[in-house]
Amino acid sequence: MPATAQDIIDENAAIERALAREGIAARDEADRAGAAAEIDMIGPLENPDVEASYEGGGGETEWQLRLVQPIDLNGRRGALRDAARAEALAVDADIDRRRQLLVSDVRIAFVECAAATAELDIWQRYTAELTEAERVSSVRAEAGDTAVYDVRRVRVEQRSAQAQLARANGEQVAGCAALTSLTGIEEPQVELSAITQVDVAPAPNERPDILAQKQRVLAASQRVSAARRARLPQLAVGAGVRRVDDGTDTAYGPALSLGVSLPIWNGSGAAVRREQALLAARENELLIARRQAEAEVQAASARRSATREAAVTAAGARDDAGRLGTIAETAYQAGEIGVVELLDAYEAARDADLSVIALALEAALAAIEYDLTTGRTY
């Protein structure tokens, strides 16, 4: 059933919807099919040759028709087939990494949508508080308990809050647009607490992109082996039929042949050097990738810990700031404080909430980045 605007989705549901969208699975299957076809293209034997020959002279003619089959005794085609298998495993790893990148994009869009929704909720609450403050100040001003200045001061702040509310509404729509694009869910509804519920799973043994490069190193080494074996002579066996006509009689018999290719003019030395150079390039790419991945994990781990600690600290301060508004409202209605103190309490609570959202979003993005750098699998 298609999701509706009233459905509240969680992170796993968003990931499932994104992975199930049209084209994702079909593209993966096409890549796998292409890699499997590469293996099947390199069979155990080369295609045979058909040879026909004719000899004539002295009233006698001879026809021969043979099927000549090269025999891969040196194992060159076997090495090429092993290289194709390694490339197929590398394609599988590429698909896994591509899925991880998609999942990371969905998780980022999910928490950004949650953060934008939470900020919109904060501005809505702040605007409602100012609306109530304007009502209270107007009643007090009419009763002569406070100056008209309080009413005008609250109205100014309220107009500014309404402008910020309009901006937050647009940011919420824009913040959830990426999630809509990735999942296909129109106007997705997310829990406001989703931004603080990002979990981190244990890291696998190795990232898929590193595994893909390892398989391509293996494939390159197999191609080096195939190039070396191509320098050896190749055997070809032929079998067919022989027809001899001497003018008075015609005789038929078998025609057998045995041939050996001699790599004299082209010993494939250049091919071996080329494959060795490609192998060296692949090995160094793998070395660089491992070093870079290690640095990424260390940086992401440090950033995740720091941002989480900052978010927790900000959340602790938010509780005190949140109580300021209630205390200030009671005091203002009793005439114990002025409108400036009331607005200051509202702003302190608002800023504390916005700070918590900003730091929680930063912590969530850091956790998602850490999962991506470690190669978390879904």
Image (cartoon, helix red, strand yellow):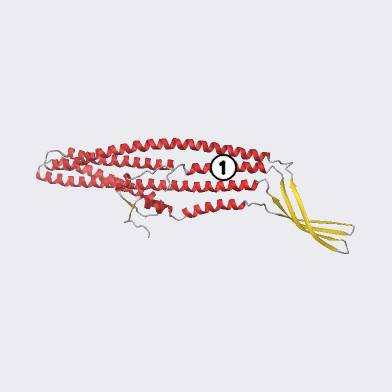
Residue 9 location, x and y as percent? 34, 53
The residue singled out by tag 1 in the image is 218
Circle 1: residue type: Leu
Q: Left or right: where does residue 293 sit relative to residue 281?
A: left
Residue 159 appears in which quarter of the rendering?
top left
**SS for tag 1?**
helix
Residue 362 location, x and y as percent? 35, 40
The residue under the point 54% across, 36% down is 284
The residue under the point 41% across, 35% down is 299
Relative depth, front residue between 179 and 123 = 179
Residue 40 location, x and y as percent? 60, 53
Q: Is residue 181 visible in this depiction of the protein?
A: no
**Which residue sits furthest right?**
58
Q: Is residue 103 visible in this depiction of the protein?
A: yes
Residue 5 location, x and y as percent? 33, 56
Relative depth, front residue between 121 and 308 = 308
Count of labels in the image: 1
Q: Left or right: where does residue 212 sit relative to residue 319?
A: right
